Amino acid sequence: RTTTDPAFAMSLAEDLRTVDPARAAFLALWNDEIKSGEEVLLHFSPSGTVTLLRGDKSVGAVASPVLARCLLQSWLGPDPVSSLATR
């Protein structure tokens, strides 16, 4: 999903109303276009910090257990980004 995907935005909006700074901070990390073949990783720490990596470079991190849960749910929840993610 892209950050402009309505389902992605909706999954973030539903649970992040009270933590809008985390949502805004996460979306702000995606200011450059993703190039074809570029590896993009999200790292989830046990404390709830989400780190965005592009290639071997860290773009930034957001400490928010609610954000981490919303992002994981968008990949692994009932309406996943990819059915392959739940296999």
Image: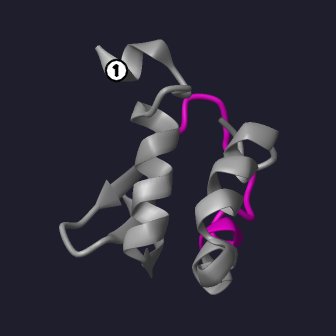
Write the residue at 65% across / 30% down: 36
Percent coordinates x, y for residue 75 in the rendering: 46, 35
Is 3 above or below relative to 75? Answer: below
Q: Position of residue 16 (x, y in %)?
A: 61, 70
Q: Determine the residue located farthest toward the left in the rendered image.
A: 46
What's the amino acid at mark 1?
Answer: Thr
Magenta part of the chain: 26-38
- Horizontal placement of 60 versus 36: left or right? left
The colour scheme applied to this rendered structure is one colour
The residue identified by callout 1 is 86
Please determine whether, in this image, residue 16 is positioned above or below residue 83: below
Mark yes or no: residue 13 visible: yes
* In-image side of 31 versus 78 (left or right): right
- Residue 84 coordinates in the image, percent (x, y): 40, 14
Residue 27's image quarter? Answer: bottom right
Q: Residue at horizontal 29%, vertical 14%?
A: 87
Callout 1 secondary element: helix
Left or right of residue 66: residue 35: right
Q: Is residue 36 above or below residue 15?
A: above
Query: Label 1: few (<14), some or many (≥20) within 10 Å?
Result: few
Give yes or no for residue 86 being in the magenta stretch: no
